């Protein structure tokens, strides 16, 4: 047990780096020096197009100029690839010439935030790390390649700034490699979660890192989740790239609590050390010769990076499956396993996986019932209590099931049955996701070698536990951090997914678990239930961990007039008092066209917000439909302007003379950011020629000062940004 504990500690806790002080040597990255920059960046939320955003931009330009750079601001109108967003963005770019001409290294972080968050981690920490890293880089020997810095605007609104850079900035064609840095929490190691195709040489560069946290399974999972970052724009432009993110502490992500004081400085130091090492390595590499094959790669305890060509994955799978067949034959010939019983054991593991995953999901729901506000379970700050409960429940349940199956099946049959499941998953991964094969192939290979040795050799009884541990060590080293990473990466409601690798690993441990006392399974199960109760009670809200509350003010020209709205299933007393006793819950199509979520709505005071302007330039026949040209703008310099068409589908649309959408849409919408008072010229080709309504909403962030001042301690705006808004709505009909 001591050896297992050491392995777990190595796998989970070795990434932390002591933050270097402000007196660190010039060529060393200092987290505390970076924190000085971050303090100015993350004072208040600064979403794209806001006044605070312009102040942060001016600060970053000053800091780069103070280091001797010649920063530029690239102002450009950009259209997102989803064709639902557009806007005016202001990227900050700077270039440090290298010692020899050639391709440039691009360092990227975004400097905009969501409307409710100061963005200390997302992505102020990455911006500050780049500034401090550049200072340390310039303190040493110069590198051969040009270094281009891009502080992108509009990442939070579909990467508008990154799109503008690759489409309109002349330096984009000089880029040989892009390194993008993100945060989806406020701590944890900086994980490599995405690479460009043909990544073999890029992965080789990771060996220069003192602490490396990377595996090709993360990219396979990321492709499935599809969360967009700026790297998507670089990838579509054909650039080679590496995409990094720290993902622990996600309960502070996109929230008021993403502040400098909440940032884990050990994570910032590890981030900066990695950034500086990569900048030095790739700054001296030949970036014009990065093309190559893909790699399967993974780290061991954050210290050693293992990598081999992805083309080997098929051969490795074949060898492991042949070894599995050989061990099965050997076990049958030795009389230690019966063929049909082994197959039955394999089939038993499948419903066991489903059963235990279902048990943990029910436990998650039950934990929500133990909270005062169960519908807010996704905002839990203490989700690691739930992970601990899930691990105990899964392990205890698996041990009890193994004991029960042991009445009919031998221990080796259970082990080899689990190995058959691993083999089937390995085969599937080889076909569908070769990057994921390492996490199945090497634990299975080690187990088979251990079992074959036990079957063939004269192993003394005292040595059997050591040999069994050898067979399980790869599974522990690879699966333990995988479980933690899955938990940090996935929403808390998907906790049951973490059960799958736990139970799979328990299957390989069947022989070792058979030696444990019978009461252990029941004890683990009871401990899991007890921890579940602790998790449910710990998940409440207080001054340090305030309850998220949704509240918006919407003023429409005409009916229903000014109203307060809230999406919360059960209103907090503070919000209920603002909405008034007459508030009721219903869908609000006049205020939110095409949005069918029920909201509480109550009459509000008329704040006399200036309404957005809608000017119809022309309406003309176009086949069976019409061509409508209109101009809209905000009188409040609002950072967000939304245009929606109700009553007909749109076949084509252009905005400010550029194609915005060319596919037929029944619910057409434009979200424009950072336009201020600048007009938008919108040209629409509708499907039919009949009356339509144009809804225009301009949005400013923050509640009226008098209302905001009444917010009680223990209450914050809902994370994500779609809360604490003042919206002015105008509707115009076109006959």
Image: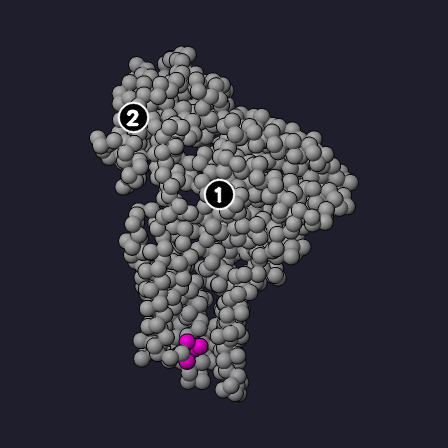
Q: Is residue 202 above or below residue 93?
A: below
> Residue 282 placed where, x, y %?
69, 47
Q: Is residue 585 left or right of residue 390?
A: left
Q: Is residue 190 magenta?
A: no
Here the colouring is one colour
Q: Residue at x 42, y 69 (%)?
A: 506
Q: Residue at x 73, y 42 (%)?
A: 138
Please tell me which residue lies in front, 684 or 494. Answer: 494
Q: Residues within 10 Å of mark 1 (few under 14, many from 20)?
A: many
Query: Can I make out residue 537 in this image?
Result: yes
* Whole-number angstrom distance, CA of label 1 to CA of label 2: 31 Å
Q: Which mark is residue 258?
A: 1
Q: Residues within 10 Å of mark 2 (few under 14, many from 20)?
A: some
Q: Which mark is residue 155?
A: none
- Which range of residues does the magenta coloring cover? 511-515
Q: Secondary structure at mark 2?
A: loop
Q: Is residue 283 left or right of residue 707?
A: right
> Residue 336 placed where, x, y %?
42, 83
Residue designated by label 2: 604
Q: Is residue 76 above or below residue 3?
A: above
Q: Residue at x 35, y 21 (%)?
A: 607
Q: Main secondary structure of the magenta part?
A: helix
Q: Is disc 1 in contact with disc 2, using a CB cutoff of under 8 Å?
A: no
Q: Residue at x 44, y 83 (%)?
A: 333
> Residue 53 placed where, x, y %?
53, 30
To which quarter of the image does residue 534 belong?
bottom left
Q: Quadrant of the C terminus?
A: top left
């Amino acid at each position: 047990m001591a050896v297992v504990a050491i392995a777990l500690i190595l796998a989970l806790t070795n990434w932390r780096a002591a933050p270097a002080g402000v007196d660190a040597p010039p060529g060393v990255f200092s987290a505390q020096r970076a924190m000085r920059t971050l303090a100015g960046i993350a004072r208040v939320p600064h979403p794209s197009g806001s006044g605070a955003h312009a102040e942060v931009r001016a600060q970053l330009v000053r800091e780069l100029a103070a280091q001797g750079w010649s920063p530029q601001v690239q102002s450009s109108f950009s259209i997102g690839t989803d064709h639902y967003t557009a806007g005016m963005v202001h990227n900050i770019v700077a270039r440090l010439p290298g010692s020899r001409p050639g391709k440039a290294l691009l360092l990227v972080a975004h400097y905009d935030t969501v409307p409710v968050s100061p963005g200390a981690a997302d992505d102020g920490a990455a911006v500050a790390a780049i500034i401090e890293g550049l200072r340390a880089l310039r303190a040493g020997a110069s590198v051969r390649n040009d270094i281009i810095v891009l502080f992108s605007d509009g990442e939070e609104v579909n990467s508008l700034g990154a799109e503008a850079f690759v489409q309109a900035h002349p330096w984009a064609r000089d880029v040989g490699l892009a390194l993008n840095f993100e945060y989806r929490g406020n701590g944890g190691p900086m994980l490599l979660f995405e690479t460009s195709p043909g990544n073999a040489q890029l992965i080789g560069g990771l060996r220069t890192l003192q602490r490396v946290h990377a595996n090709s399974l993360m990219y396979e999972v990321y492709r499935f989740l599809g969360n967009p970052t700026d790297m998507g724009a670089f990838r579509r432009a054909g650039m080679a790239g590496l995409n990094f993110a720290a993902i622990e502490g996600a309960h502070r992500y996109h929230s008021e609590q993403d502040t400098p004081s909440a940032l884990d400085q050990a994570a910032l130091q590890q981030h900066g050390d990695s950034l500086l090492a990569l900048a030095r390595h790739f700054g001296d590499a030949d970036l014009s010769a990065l093309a190559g094959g893909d790699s399967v790669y993974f780290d061991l305890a954050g210290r050693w990076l293992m990598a081999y060509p992805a083309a080997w994955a098929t051969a490795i799978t074949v060898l492991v499956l042949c070894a599995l067949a050989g061990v099965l034959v050997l076990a049958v010939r030795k009389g230690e396993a019966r063929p049909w019983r082994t197959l039955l054991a394999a089939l038993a593991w499948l419903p066991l996986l489903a059963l235990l995953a279902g048990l943990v999901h029910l436990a998650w729901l039950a934990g929500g019932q133990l909270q005062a506000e169960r519908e807010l379970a996704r905002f839990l700050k203490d989700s690691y209590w739930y992970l601990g409960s899930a691990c105990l429940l899964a392990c205890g349940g698996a041990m009890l099931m193994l004991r029960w199956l042991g009445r009919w099946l031998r221990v080796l049959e259970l082990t080899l049955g689990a190995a058959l499941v691993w083999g089937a998953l390995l085969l599937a991964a080889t076909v569908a996701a070769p990057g994921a094969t390492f996490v199945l192939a090497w634990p299975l290979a080690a187990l088979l070698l251990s079992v074959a040795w036990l079957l063939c050799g004269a192993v003394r009884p005292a040595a059997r536990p050591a040999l069994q541990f050898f067979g399980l060590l790869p599974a522990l080293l690879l699966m333990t951090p995988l479980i933690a990473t899955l938990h940090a990466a996935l929403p808390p409601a998907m906790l049951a997914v973490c059960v799958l690798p736990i139970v799979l690993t328990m299957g390989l441990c069947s022989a070792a678990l058979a030696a444990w006392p019978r009461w252990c399974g029941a004890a683990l199960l009871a401990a899991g239930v007890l921890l579940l109760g602790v998790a449910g009670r710990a998940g409440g809200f207080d001054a340090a961990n305030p309850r998220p509350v949704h509240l918006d003010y919407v003023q429409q020209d005409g009916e229903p007039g000014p109203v307060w709205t809230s999406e919360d299933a059960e209103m907090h007393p503070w919000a209920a008092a603002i909405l008034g006793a007459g508030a009721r819950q219903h869908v609000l199509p006049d205020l939110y066209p095409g949005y069918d979520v029920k909201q509480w709505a109550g009459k509000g005071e008329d704040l006399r917000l200036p309404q957005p302007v809608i000017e119809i330039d022309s309406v003309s026949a176009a086949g069976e439909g019409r061509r409508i040209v209109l101009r809209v703008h905000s009188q409040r310099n609002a950072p967000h302007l939304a245009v929606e068409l109700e009553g007909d589908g749109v076949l084509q649309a252009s905005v400010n003379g550029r194609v915005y959408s060319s596919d037929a849409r029944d619910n057409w919408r434009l979200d424009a950011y950072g336009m201020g008072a600048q007009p938008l010229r919108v040209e629409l080709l509708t499907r039919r020629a009949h009356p339509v309504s144009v809804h225009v909403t301009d949005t400013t962030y923050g509640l009226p000062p008098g209302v905001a001042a009444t917010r009680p301690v223990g209450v914050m705006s809902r994370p994500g940004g779609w809360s604490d808004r003042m919206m002015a709505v105008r509707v115009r009909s076109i006959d």
